Amino acid sequence: MALKLKVTLVNSPIDRPATQKATVRGLGLRRMHHSVVVEDTPSIRGMIRKIQHLVSVEPADNA
């Protein structure tokens, strides 16, 4: 079973470069304090690293 990550948007993407805004949307984050659960893959890790100053990441519960 693949690991999952809970990604939460904690800072606004307003006044950020378009590539960072697109990455936020690509992860499925729509508004402040919105969380999504995603697979832990290298591509997702790269997206998270690109916007690490805007998001909070923690392991998802396996419930």
Image (cartoon, helix red, strand yellow):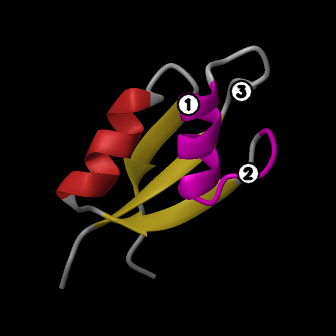
Q: Which residue is mark 2?
A: 34
Residue at the front extreme?
18
Q: Is residue 43 left or right of residue 58?
A: left
Q: Which residue is mark 1?
A: 20
Q: Residues within 10 Å of mark 2 (few under 14, many from 20)?
A: few
Which quadrant of the rendered structure holds the N terminus? Answer: bottom left
**Amino acid found under the numbered disc labelled 3:** Pro
Q: Residue at x 38, y 77 (%)?
A: 62
**How many numbered circles are shown?**
3
Give the number of the disc on residue 13: 3
Q: Residue at x 79, y 22 (%)?
A: 14
As drawn, 13 above or below 38: above
Badge 3 or badge 1: first in the primary sequence: 3
Give the number of the disc on residue 55: none
Prevailing secondary structure of the magenta residues: helix
Q: Which residues are magenta?
A: 18-32
| Residue nearer the viewer, 18 or 5 | 18
- Quadrant for residue 63, please give it: bottom left
**Amino acid found under the numbered disc labelled 1:** Gln
Q: Position of residue 42 (x, y in %)?
A: 19, 54
Q: Is residue 45 left or right of residue 19?
A: left
Badge 2 or badge 1: first in the primary sequence: 1
Q: Residue at x 44, y 41 (%)?
A: 57
